Image (cartoon, helix red, strand yellow):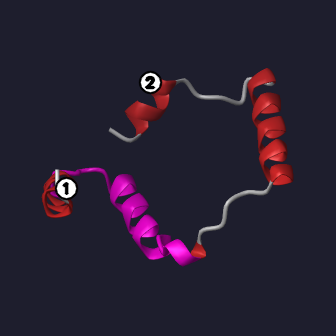
Amino acid sequence: MDIQTRKIEFVQAFLKLQSEEMISLFESILKSGNKDDFHPMNIDELNNRIDKSEKDFETGKVKIHDEVFAKYS
């Protein structure tokens, strides 16, 4: 699939959105989506994120897939 077809399909799907939250999310992605602003995590940042995620899991601070999907559907 070429880039033009992908863009058209994306716009068509976007136009069907009814969720204000999803539209806001896409707006923020577009505003901050400059690739020049992207920087990969270093190993310490990655390890800290893993540690935090594991602690959140152990303490029950997680949401199952269905909860997240329902929120953004």
Seen from the viewer's position, the closer of residues 54 and 36 is 36
Query: To which residue does mark 1 refer?
Result: 6
- Assess disc 2: are there few (<14), some (14-19) or many (≥20) residues with their C-alpha within 10 Å of its C-alpha: few
Main secondary structure of the magenta stretch: helix
Q: Of helix, strand and loop, which one carries label 1?
A: helix
Measuring 84% from the left and 36% from the top, which residue is drawn there? 51
Using the image, determine if residue 35 lies above or below residue 25.
Answer: below
User: Left or right: where does residue 56 sit relative to residue 34?
Assistant: right
User: Left or right: where does residue 53 sit relative to residue 16?
Assistant: right
User: Left or right: where does residue 21 sit relative to residue 54?
Assistant: left
Q: Quadrant of the C terminus?
A: top left
Seen from the viewer's position, the closer of residues 32 and 5 is 5
Q: Amino acid at mark 2?
A: Asp
Could you say where residue 40 lies in the image, as x and y percent from the top left?
Answer: 67, 60
- Assess disc 1: are there few (<14), some (14-19) or many (≥20) residues with their C-alpha within 10 Å of its C-alpha: few
Measuring 59% from the left and 75% from the top, which residue is drawn there? 37
Measuring 38% from the left and 41% from the top, which residue is drawn there? 72
Could you say where residue 47 lies in the image, as x and y percent from the top left?
Answer: 83, 43
Let me know if residue 55 is in the magenta part. no
- Numbered range of the magenta stretch: 15-36
Q: Amino acid at mark 1?
A: Arg
Let me know if residue 25 is in the magenta part. yes
The numbered mark, 1 or 2, whose residue comes first in the sequence reads: 1
Residue 66 circle label: 2
Q: Of helix, strand and loop, which one carries label 2?
A: helix
